[in-house]
């Protein structure tokens, strides 16, 4: 256990040493994998479509001639003749599979039929009007990369391409417990807890917000014991300060948890604590909304990764509008607005007063800064 406030780098190293990475991957039926993170590149097992496919009703031909013998039709979902003779044609429909050497599908209105012969009306009748085999995806082609989220649209496409199952990361289950006598009996959910729940869900996790518990070692302990039976990661919010009623640390220790560290050199969020409880990570977040959000984004992705889960976070490069200098050993997390100036992304740090919630309305991103960064430098903006 560390008694001194750790640098962010030290905290991440300790988290890595405490957690055993065991990739949480499952083979899921395609549509059950929606909104999960793909754990392995999804590759087309065969050409899609498997054969050329007509995009309209008409007649398929393999050459350009003045007339063709009509040999019959190719109904939908029926395998066509493998090869089409130059002098022959078949009537086809939108979605009909075509012979592999097809060149054109002549629209019905662009040809006439006389005694079993097809007569194209003009030169303009010779248009392709079909898609090639493998035009949507070719055999062996990667269609969704590892680390992407499987969307309903992507799942529909994969289903049509004949893919039935996908490897995805399991969603971590996150239990969130607000702590504070002042929160008990309020109407509606705890605001900071609600914010953290939404951010946890944005990382592709399953999050549940518990009702608040009062500042009581016994009641906090009992609530934590219940959480540990159900969730992969435990978050408490509040009770991390130095006053007599900040009892979260005492409660976790009283219920058998191990304190790994208390205090990180991040602002805001210095009083954040990290515990191991029944083999699960427990992060004690400050009750202040700004501090809770910054500590959450700095610590939780690291924990998910070390546990073998995957997370989604979106970053973009932006030009810093104003120089920043952070004391040595410390990390500052700034709420920022991303501006578009003549096609250039600018990161403007917001003047956010402590304990206010306006950052929820105005900020687009977090800037995680150590040391000195000069005006005009490119920085990573973590979009929120």
Image: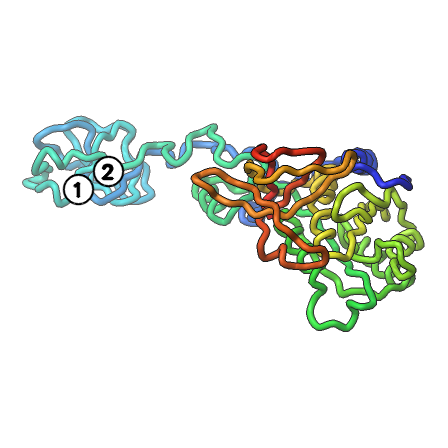
Q: Quadrant of residue 150?
A: top right
Could you say whether the residue bearing mark 2 is in a helix, strand or loop?
loop
Name the foreground residue: 163 vs 22: 22
Q: Is residue 50 left or right of residue 355?
A: left
User: Whole-percent x and y of residue 88?
Assistant: 16, 31
Residue beneath the point at 89% across and 61% down: 245
- For image coordinates 76% across by 48% down, the residue present is 269
**Residue 107 numbered mark, or none:** 1
Residue at the right extreme, as displayed: 254
Q: Is residue 253 left or right of residue 340?
A: right
Q: Residue at x 33, y 43 (%)?
A: 77
Disc 1 packing (10 Å; few <14; some 14–19; many ≥20):
many
Q: Taking 205 as reference, is 346 above or below it?
A: above
Residue 15 x/y as whole percent: 80, 38
The answer to which of 235 and 65 lies nearer the viewer is: 235
Tell me which corner region of the image, top left, top right, bottom left or bottom right, holds residue 321: top right
Residue furthest to the left in view is: 114
Q: Residues within 10 Å of mark 2 (few under 14, many from 20)?
A: some
> Can I make out residue 299 in this image?
yes
Which residue position is annotated with label 2?
A: 129
Q: CA distance from mark 2 to mark 1?
A: 8 Å
Counting from the top left corner in percent of width and height, residue 312 is at 61, 43
The residue located at (11%, 28%) in the rendering is 65
**Numbered circles on residues, count:** 2
Residue 12 visible somewhere in the drawing: no
Q: Are marks 2 and 1 in contact (CB under 8 Å)?
A: yes
**Quarter of the picture holding the N terminus:** top right
């Amino acid at each position: 256990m560390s008694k001194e406030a750790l640098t962010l780098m030290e905290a991440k190293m300790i988290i890595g040493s405490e957690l055993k990475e065991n990739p949480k991957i499952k083979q899921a039926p395609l549509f059950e994998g929606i909104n999960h993170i793909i754990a392995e590149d999804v590759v087309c097992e065969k050409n899609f479509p498997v054969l050329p496919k007509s995009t309209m009703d008409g007649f398929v031909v393999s050459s350009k001639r003045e007339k063709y013998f009509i040999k019959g039709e190719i109904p939908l979902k029926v395998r066509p003749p493998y090869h089409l003779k130059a002098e022959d044609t078949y009537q086809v429909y939108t979605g009909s599979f075509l012979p592999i050497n097809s060149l054109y599908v002549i629209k019905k209105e662009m040809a006439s039929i006389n005694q079993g012969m097809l007569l194209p009306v003009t030169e303009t009748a010779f248009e392709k009007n079909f898609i090639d085999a493998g035009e949507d995806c070719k055999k062996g082609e990667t269609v969704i990369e590892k680390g992407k989220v499987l969307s309903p649209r992507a799942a529909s496409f994969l289903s049509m391409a004949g893919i039935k199952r996908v490897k995805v990361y399991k969603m971590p289950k996150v239990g969130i417990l607000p702590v504070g006598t002042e929160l008990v009996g309020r109407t509606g959910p705890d605001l900071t807890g609600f914010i953290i729940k939404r951010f946890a869900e944005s990382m592709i996790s399953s999050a549940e917000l518990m009702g608040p518990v009062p500042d009581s070692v016994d009641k906090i302990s009992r609530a934590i014991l219940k959480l540990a039976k159900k969730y992969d990661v435990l978050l408490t919010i509040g009770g991390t300060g130095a006053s007599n009623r900040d009892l979260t640390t005492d409660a976790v220790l009283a219920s058998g948890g191990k304190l790994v560290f208390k205090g990180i050199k991040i602002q805001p969020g210095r009083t954040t604590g990290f515990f191991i409880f029944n083999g699960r990570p427990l992060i004690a977040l400050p009750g202040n909304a700004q501090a809770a959000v910054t500590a959450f984004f700095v610590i939780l992705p690291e924990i998910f990764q070390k546990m073998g889960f995957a997370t989604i976070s979106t970053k973009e490069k932006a030009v810093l509008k104003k120089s920043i200098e952070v004391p040595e050993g410390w990390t500052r997390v700034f709420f920022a607005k991303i501006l578009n100036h003549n096609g250039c992304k600018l990161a403007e740090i917001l003047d956010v007063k402590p304990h206010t919630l306006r950052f929820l309305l105005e900020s687009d991103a977090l800037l995680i800064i150590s040391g000195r960064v000069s005006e005009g430098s490119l920085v990573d903006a973590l979009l929120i």
